[in-house]
Image (cartoon, rainbow, N blue to C red):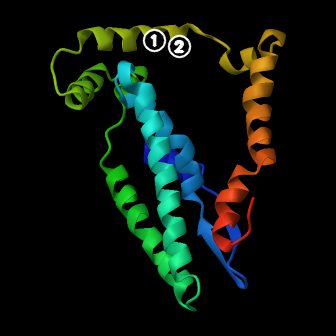
Amino acid sequence: MALKNLLTFSVFECRPFYDRHSYCTLDLASTSVQVVPLYLSEIAPTKIRGTVNQLLQLTTCLCIFIANFVNNAIEKRTWGWRLSLGLATVPATLMFIGGLFLPETSNSLIEQGRLEEGRRVQEKVRGTKNIEAELYDLLESSEAAKAIKIRFRNLLKKKNRPQLIIGALGIPVFQQLTGSGQCITVLPYGTHC
């Protein structure tokens, strides 16, 4: 499921690289920023769900930090950009291969009506047969979700407009206007934010 979503939402993107090089990449990385937290939220136990997502953010920032050091160490060499791209393919390949073996979430299986498969996945992920309370919560949530008839139209109602504006427009615009993405991209090349 995660892999299917990752490939469905992927787009081509061209970016300038160093001074005169450019390359086109299948932008799976930006899509994984959306898909991976969703998968982790569905698979993680309720008590540590926030912690798991924060650890994902921490590891992402640490990886960017390490990549900046590597890029700065090799930027003066003419072949440096090749090494940088080559090194970036190692974790990407490992994550892609690992993603092929991830189970579908029990929540997704239950919503599809595959209760027994959902139970098996939940037992495997939790490492215990004592999952009745959590399984009951998943069933209850699934039934509540099915009871809602017009899900997306509800977003456009007047009472939900503040959440829609903040979530769909405010946060992305604010993130772009603060320039945090540009700092990550430009800072290694000597320009200060």
Tell me the SS state at disc 2: helix
Residue 56 at x, y percent in the picture: 45, 42
Quarter-of-image position of residue 142: top left
In this view, 18 is above or below 102: below
Horizontally, residue 29 falls left or right of residue 149, namely left
**Disc 1 from disc 2: Cα separation:** 6 Å
Q: Is residue 163 visible?
A: yes
Disc 2 marks a residue whose amino acid type is Ala
Picture residue at 51% right of the left edge, 42% below the top: 35
Rendered view: 114 above or below 29: above
Query: Residue, x 39% and y 57% (percent of image)?
Result: 96
- Amino acid type of the residue that numbered disc 1 sits on in the rendered structure: Ser
Q: Secondary structure at mark 1?
A: helix
User: Disc 2 marks which residue?
Assistant: 145
- In the rendered view, tell whether residue 24 sits above or below residue 76: above
Q: Is residue 12 visible?
A: no
Residue under pointer 1: 141
Q: Are marks 1 and 2 in contact (CB under 8 Å)?
A: yes
